[in-house]
Image: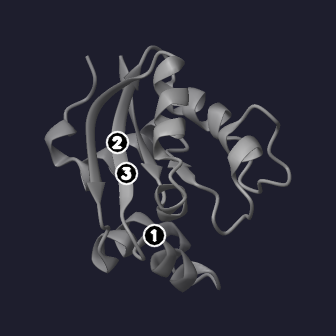
């Protein structure tokens, strides 16, 4: 079983969509093995978005993810769990996200697109270590 990190972002929590998003993921068969409603502080946000440091939108990303609580969770499933989540999320830009995806059905704008999911198994491991250090051992 592989694990991946998912963040239901502040806009989704503010709009009351966390339950809908969690239901979609768990109805698919993914299992929540850790979760927390948390206000992500600026230090953690900067470490999470380190790859975007220096880009014009970096400060906006940090401000957005820290403005109010996010629902952060580790999901577990068979195979490439991160890829399953990414497909369910849909394209980053909701205007391009397919109907039936989380962003295609629920998101309104690219800067507030409801959900983050790890984009590779390596990224999943690093993000899990960042948010849930108790899961630092590789999946068996």
> Which residue is at a point 28% across and 23% down the rendered structure image?
139
Can you tell which of label 3 and label 2 is closer to the viewer?
Answer: 3
**N-terminal-most mark, 2 or 1:** 1
The residue beneath circle 1 is 65
The residue beneath circle 2 is 73
Q: Is residue 69 above or below residue 6?
A: below
Tell me which corner region of the image, top left, top right, bottom left or bottom right, holds residue 34: top left
Q: In screen coordinates, is 138 left or right of 52? A: left
Q: In screen coordinates, is 104 left or right of 22? A: right
Real-space Cα separation, disc 2 to disc 1, in angstroms? 15 Å
Q: Residues within 10 Å of mark 1 (few under 14, many from 20)?
A: many
Q: Is disc 3 in contact with disc 1, using a CB cutoff of under 8 Å?
A: no
Q: Is disc 3 in contact with disc 2, using a CB cutoff of under 8 Å?
A: yes
Total residue callouts: 3
- Label 1 residue SS: helix
The residue beneath circle 3 is 71
Real-space Cα separation, disc 3 to disc 1, in angstroms? 11 Å
**N-terminal-most mark, 3 or 1:** 1
């Amino acid at each position: 079983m592989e694990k991946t990190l998912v963040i239901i972002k502040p806009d989704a929590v503010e709009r009351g969509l966390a339950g809908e998003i969690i239901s979609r993921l768990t109805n698919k068969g993914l299992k929540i093995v850790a979760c927390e409603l948390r206000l992500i502080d600026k230090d953690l946000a900067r470490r999470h978005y380190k790859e975007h440091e220096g880009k014009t939108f970096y400060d906006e990303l940090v401000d957005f993810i820290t403005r109010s609580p996010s629902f952060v969770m580790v999901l577990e499933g068979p195979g490439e769990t991160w890829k399953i989540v990414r497909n369910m999320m849909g394209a980053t830009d909701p205007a391009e996200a397919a109907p039936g995806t989380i962003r295609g059905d629920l998101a309104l704008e690219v800067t507030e697109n409801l959900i983050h999911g790890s984009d590779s198994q390596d990224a999943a491991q690093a993000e899990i270590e960042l948010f849930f250090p108790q899961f630092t051992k590789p999946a068996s």
